[in-house]
Image (cartoon, helix red, strand yellow):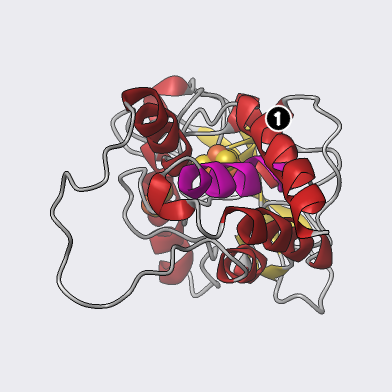
Amino acid sequence: MNLTLRIWRQKNAQTPGQFVEYNLPDVSADMSFLEMLDVLNQDLIKRGEDPVAFDSDCREGICGMCGLVINGTAHGPLAATTTCQLHMRHFRDGDHLTIEPWRAKSFPVIKDLVVDRNSFDRIIAAGGFVSVSTGEAPEANSIPVPKPDQDRAMDAAACIGCGACVAACKNASAMLFVAAKVSHLNLLPQGKVEKDRRVVNLVKAMDDEGFGNCTVMGSCEAVCPKEISLDFISRMNRDYLKALLRVK
Ligand code: SF4
Ligand code: FES
């Protein structure tokens, strides 16, 4: 298939960016979206032009590194799918594709389609962990966990930290990401000791990083490649209120 690509090019965070149009012929329907960009980059390098910078690592939908806004939708048109798992068979010959980076103040552009998501790392560092004493691993069944709690914690743990929820939100809110991280640990007995501190510290770190507030529009849930539910935001809000009462 032949495609027209309109790609955001930006030298660095200090330089204003712009869309540049490229025509890409003979795109195979079996290519992934990122392989299609690899082919474009090979052509650009052959012509002596600067290749398009974009992030990826696993290309298996598990690391959270990839993330492009494709025709206005974070991670593109296929639900519950990361950009790296999106294949060109979902597009048609002659399509025009607009490809942009995540747009959010807390995710500044590094170059072209690559954004700086260190703000997420700093949020995790504020409490997205469980403190354990060192020593031998405890016997696996020494702490029974009810099955419903296991399931909910696993659902929350599916978050790969890609940032699509922020990119899709008109307020650039990181509530879905933070709620997933809070619930993943707060639901488990191992995470209960630091439960109150965790939720208060993560929410504070989120606010300090400049992410916006949640107005429950659901655009985050709609684009999340791991189908993290808005219910986790309600759960986090409950945990947060209870923690504030207990901490004070
Ligand atoms: S909640 Fe979903 S969209 Fe947001 S960072 Fe996690 S996996 Fe990505
Ligand atoms: S490159 Fe790892 S999730 Fe896409």
Which structural element holds mark 1? helix
Q: Is residue 110 magenta?
A: no
What's under tag 1, amino acid-wise? Answer: Ser
Q: Name the residue under label 1.
A: 234
Residue at (32, 25) in percent of width and height = 147
Residue at (64, 49) in percent of width and height = 178
Residue at (58, 26) in percent of width and height = 229
Q: Is the magenta stretch mostly helix, strand or loop?
A: helix
Q: Quadrant of residue 90?
A: top left
Q: Does residue 149 appear in this view?
A: yes
Magenta residues span 174-186
Question: Where in the figure is residue 84, as x and y percent of width and height?
Answer: 40, 43
Q: Does the magenta stretch include residue 183?
A: yes
Q: Does residue 23 appear in this view?
A: no
Question: Where in the figure is residue 156, as x and y percent of width and height?
Answer: 48, 38
Residue 181 appears left or right of 71: left
Work out whether residue 237 or residue 18 is closer to the camera in this orientation and state it.
237
Q: Is residue 77 depicted above or below 66 in this figure?
A: above
> Mark 1 near ligand 1 (CB under 8 Å)?
no
Question: Where in the figure is residue 73, as x and y percent of width and height?
Answer: 66, 32
Work out whether residue 225 or residue 246 is closer to the camera in this orientation and state it.
246
Q: In which quarter of the image is the N terminus?
A: top left
Question: Where in the figure is residue 71, as x and y percent of width and height?
Answer: 67, 33
Work out whether residue 128 or residue 219 is closer to the camera in this orientation and state it.
128
